[in-house]
Image: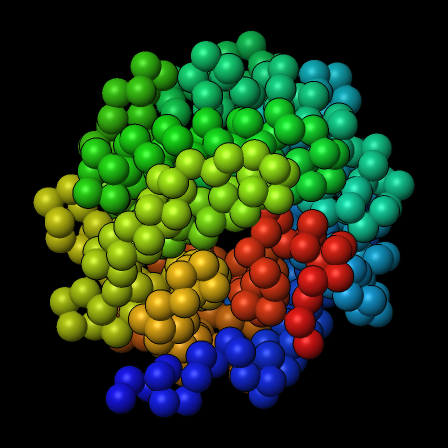
């Protein structure tokens, strides 16, 4: 008999749930070092230290604020002050008080604040939603601010998708549309719905999922095409000279298929909980995207791991395994198992955690390796230093929660299983 059939699904075992809780707390403790006394949070180096001259990064600050809000909802000490620390930076240091919107980083840094990116605004909205659900005053103030910027500047109603980026003064729009920013916007919009009850955020989530999961991915054998021009012409050669770009790599990114997979199930659950019909294609796409991600990304060329990118010729482009596809795969497998009862998903869930335990967890210096090479040795080809909490912390929670539109919403309802 298969492993999951003889011993049950790991995610349902009390000892496994205790392991998840302990690993989550280990990650939370490690990441506290990223707090900057000058405001916000920064990325950490491979040893878990703040790099010399580190400045506040908006994505890291938003992700840390979000993650510690999840921890605060569980009553974990030290979490609320870190949420408020992040909110203060997102409401002040990292916000453009003149033009609106959020910089990529501290604008007082040597390289300046950078462009106004949909990807960044989405994470600010995610953090603000979680903090508002937690009941932090800074979150309740920040949330309408960021949602109004998204609605006025970034949401393209005629396209049902997000505009990608602008110059700092919003005077010049980038000639680009991207799947990655839209994927994280979908996630943020579902959390915003849980925080506000405003169904427009469910409507927008559904339109994003319909375009990318039900149309574009379906047309491509359930591969997520990533890069487009303003008129939605696919850019297959985009960043052909930058195959290991951390946000916009050449080709396809199989890990994103896993991420879109569980977002489809969360959207289905959110629509159902709101008393609205959920299209049948959401569950179908969740299963097909998971299968496509496994087909294209797992154990390619006989190597153990989940490759970063695949070229349009089908060959592996970057063989390194980043930590985040494993984290997203764990969540996708857990939710698909909950949704279908199919033991094959429980086996993938166990397989992914086995890989994390044996190859990604750094038991000497803490946290997880951000990436490993094809031989599972720590690498910094794609990402530098140790990852922030966002990706690694969530799979310590999702297997203990029912399928829901957002993690903060489910935690606030007291749905976490011990």
Q: Would you say residue 93 is visible in this rendering?
A: no
Please state, as top left, top right, bottom left or bottom right, where the C terminus lies in the image: bottom right
Q: Quadrant of the N terminus?
A: bottom left
Is residue 295 something one can see in this rendering? yes
Location of residue 365 in the rendering, given as x and y in whole percent from the top left corner? 57, 79
Q: Position of residue 325 (x, y in %)?
A: 40, 59
Q: Residue furthest left?
A: 313
Residue drawn at the location 75% of the way across and 26% of the way down: 145
Q: Position of residue 306 (x, y in %)?
A: 30, 64
Q: Is residue 131 left or right of residue 394?
A: right
Asked whether, in this view, residue 395 is left or right of residue 177, the answer is right
- Residue drawn at point x = 36 percent, y = 16 percent: 230
Front one among 247 and 159: 159
Image side of residue 335 versus residue 394, left or right: left
Give me the residue at 14% from left, 67% from top: 301
> In the rendered view, how is the structure colored?
rainbow
Figure label count: 0
Q: Residue furthest right?
A: 137
As displayed, is residue 222 above or below residue 70? above
Q: In the figure, residue 225 lies in which quadrant?
A: top left
Given residues 62 and 281, the one toward you in this image is 281
Does residue 163 appear to the left or right of 69 in the view shown? left
Q: Position of residue 333 (x, y in %)?
A: 41, 64
Question: Going 53% across and 27% down the picture, which residue do you hit?
Answer: 204
Check the image and report above or below for 140 versus 56.
Answer: above
């Amino acid at each position: 008999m298969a492993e999951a059939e003889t011993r049950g699904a790991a995610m349902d075992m009390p000892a496994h749930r205790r392991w998840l809780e302990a690993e989550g707390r280990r990650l939370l403790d490690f990441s506290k070092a990223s707090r900057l006394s000058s405001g916000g949070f920064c990325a950490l180096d491979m040893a878990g230290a703040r790099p010399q001259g580190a400045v506040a990064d908006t994505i890291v600050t938003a992700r840390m604020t979000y993650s510690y809000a999840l921890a605060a909802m569980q009553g974990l000490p030290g979490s609320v002050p870190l949420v408020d620390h992040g909110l203060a930076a997102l409401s002040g240091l990292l916000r453009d008080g003149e033009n609106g919107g959020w910089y990529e980083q501290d604008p007082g840094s040597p390289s300046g604040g950078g462009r106004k990116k949909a990807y960044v605004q989405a994470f600010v909205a995610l953090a603000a939603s979680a903090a508002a659900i937690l009941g932090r005053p800074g979150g309740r103030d920040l949330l309408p601010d960021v949602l109004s910027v998204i609605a006025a500047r970034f949401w393209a109603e005629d396209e049902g998708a997000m505009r990608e980026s602008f110059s700092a003064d919003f005077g010049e729009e980038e000639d680009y549309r991207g799947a990655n920013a839209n994927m994280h916007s979908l996630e943020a919009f579902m959390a915003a719905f849980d925080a506000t009850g405003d169904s427009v955020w469910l409507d927008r989530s559904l339109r994003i999922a319909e375009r990318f999961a039900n149309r574009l991915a379906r047309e491509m054998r359930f591969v997520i095409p990533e890069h487009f021009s303003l008129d939605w012409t696919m850019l297959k050669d985009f960043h052909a000279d930058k195959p290991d770009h951390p946000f916009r790599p050449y080709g396809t990114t199989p890990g994103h298929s896993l991420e879109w997979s569980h977002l489809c199930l969360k959207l289905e659950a959110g629509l159902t909980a709101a008393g609205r019909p959920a299209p049948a294609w959401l569950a179908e796409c969740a299963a097909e995207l998971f299968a496509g991600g496994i087909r294209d990304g797992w154990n390619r060329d006989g190597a153990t791991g989940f490759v970063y990118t695949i070229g349009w010729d089908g060959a592996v482009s970057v063989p390194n395994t980043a930590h985040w596809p494993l984290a997203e795969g764990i969540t996708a497998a857990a939710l698909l198992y909950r949704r279908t009862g199919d033991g094959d998903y429980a086996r993938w869930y166990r397989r992914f955690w086995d890989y994390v335990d044996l190859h990604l967890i750094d038991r000497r210096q803490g946290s997880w390796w951000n990436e490993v090479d094809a031989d599972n040795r720590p690498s910094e080809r794609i990402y530098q230093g140790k990852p922030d909490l966002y990706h690694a912390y969530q799979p310590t929670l999702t297997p203990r929660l029912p399928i829901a539109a957002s993690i903060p919403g489910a935690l606030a309802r007291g749905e976490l299983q011990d």
